[in-house]
Image (tube, rainbow, N blue to C red):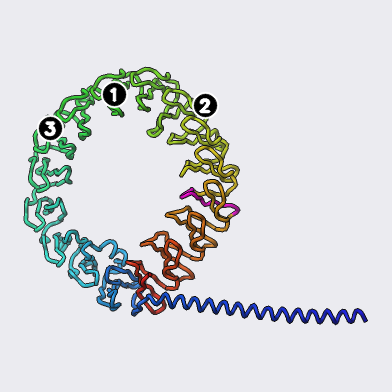
Amino acid sequence: MFCSKLKKEIKTSIKNITVAFIILLFILLSLCARFVFAESIISEKKQTNAEKNIVWFDKKYGEYYILGDSIIGAPLYDDGKYSNIGFIDKNSKSLINEISMDRDYTLLSIFENFKSSEGIIVFSKDNKFGYIDEMGNKVVKEKFEDAEKFSKGMAKVRIGGKCGYIDVKGNYVIEPKYDDIDKFSDNRMVVKLDRKYGFVDYKGKVIVEPKYEYIGKISEGMAEVQLNGECGFIDESAREVIKPKYDSVSEFNEGMVAVELDNKWGFIDKSGKVVIKPKYERVSHIFEGLSEVKLGRKLGYIDKTGKEIIKPKYDNLNPFVEGVYAVKVSKKWGLIDNAGKEIIKPKYDDIDPFVDGVYAVKVGKKWGLIDKAGKKIIKPKYDDLRASSYGGGVAVVRLGNKYGYIDKTGKEITEIKYIFAEDFEDFAKVALSDKEWGIVDRTGKEIVEPKYNYVSSFFNDMATVKLNGKVGVVDTSGKVIVEPKYDEVKNFIEGIAPVKLNGKWGYIDKSGKEVVKFKYSNADSILEGLAEVRIDGYVGYIDKKGKEIVKPKYSYVDNLFSEGFTKVVYEDKYGYIDKSGREVVEPIYDYVSNIKDNMLVVVKGDKVGLLKIN
């Protein structure tokens, strides 16, 4: 009896629970439907509001580009020989012109590479070139074999194998009768005809008939010319200042030029006056008033008057800083000053500058240090001594197969114990073995103990260290900011760095605090205040405080912000966001053009419109 009653109560309870569950499920489904409907209404309302700023016009093209007062349209794909490029008035949205062009000329190449400051654009059809304006009107009919951009109202063209210049109306300024023509100076063109060069002015008037075999570039207002195999100089007006009579010449420098005559070199000035008679086997450019010269087999230095500051008596000669020269005589090196006075007699096998008047010298196979007076600082004992140009008075030395560091007094600031020692900047990486890396400072202190499998160089005062497969961070004081625990650490920029842990990326600040949770499948360093983050292939942005400005929902985000906006793709639809993450153009379009003056072309289904960003 009791059991029968209990069974009946259980059945009733189950029935009541089932009814309650069905009612609850119905309520939930109703709420979901209302939510979806509301979202749909909101989305439609957003789209309607957004499209209030769009003026629609007929769709004819697949790709668009805003240029000045016109919109340029082109087929997105065109397998034919030509592309029909349309020019649409930005105000009336009506097609003004349509130009048939060779298919190789894309919108980008046309309007980025061939448009001039005059607003005139080079185009081609059937490999013939002409010019159009920004509204697609033909300015110059396509008839040239080649055509260049306009500059200062003129453009170089080639027709019938000959070159000339036209104005913006297509009239010849310089008749096409030359094999080549190029700008030479502000008032002269150099022309080539039958392998000879001459000059015309910007109206085509012949200044110098083509007669030269060669014309060089202008240097200090002068250019080399060659006539009958001999060299001379003209000025920027093409006036022959120095008649061609030399075998070879260099370029003008400090008002003088080296000239060769009968296998000997000397110098002349801009008037053609011989300042230094040709007598040397070799001369260098004048630099800071001096030229290295070779007389016979010996080297020396002369000044601009021809005075031998350092007599040509050395086998080799290397200028050092502070007016000191290393000189070589009979395989031995010494030092002289810039007056040619001997500082240190040539007796060393090699010599290199170190710092502050200290020099590294080699005797036999060993290196040591001397001062400017030749006094020994340390006797030659090292197998190698390497002073970097930015070492700041610290040099790498080697004994056998071990490296260490010395300062300019010769003091060993570290033990000679490393298998690797890097040249100094502010810090240097060192290694005791291939698995024991650390960092030393200029005093020789190991600020990062050589115990890590890897250390990076410092970047923004932070370096990464790796131990047993995990990565940590140290600062320039050697303090461990983060013990090695991460799988990967990228660079600190603007105070934070992306770090990877257990396959997910987050961010830490310079104190080691985790400022962004580990939830991203990839994360980049900050760039211009924003960092790109990804979740399952979807892209978003965070700011330098770690705030998620743009939630990762886009399948693509352009890396470049242009006019403050960047293109995004969401569910195969295109839009734009600004640097705050605001969707200034909702991604609902099949195509979006470039943005120009806060306007762009959008394509949606069979409709094309011009959208203005508020």
**Residue 52 quadrant:** bottom left
Q: Residue at x 13, y 60 (%)?
A: 164
Q: Are marks 1 and 2 in contact (CB under 8 Å)?
A: no
Q: CA distance from mark 1 to mark 2?
A: 34 Å
Check disc 2 and report its element: helix, strand or loop.
loop
Mark 2 or 3, which is nearer the eye? 2
The residue indicated by pointer 2 is 415
> Which comes before the other along the chain, label 1 or label 2?
1
The residue indicated by pointer 3 is 262
Q: Is residue 95 above or below residue 270?
A: below
Check disc 3 and report its element: helix, strand or loop.
loop
Q: Where is residue 567 drawn, in percent x and y?
A: 41, 65
Check disc 1 and report its element: helix, strand or loop.
strand
- Nearer to me, 353 or 42: 42
Q: Where is residue 199 drawn, in percent x and y?
A: 10, 52
- Residue 365 appears in view: no
Q: Quadrant of the C terminus?
A: bottom left
- Residue 395 appears in view: yes
Q: Residue at x 41, y 32 (%)?
A: 391
Q: With 574 as the anchor, is 478 left or right in this view?
A: right
State yes or no: residue 454 in magenta.
Answer: no
Q: Amino acid at mark 2?
A: Glu
- Nearer to me, 279 or 219: 219
Q: Which residues are magenta?
A: 491-502
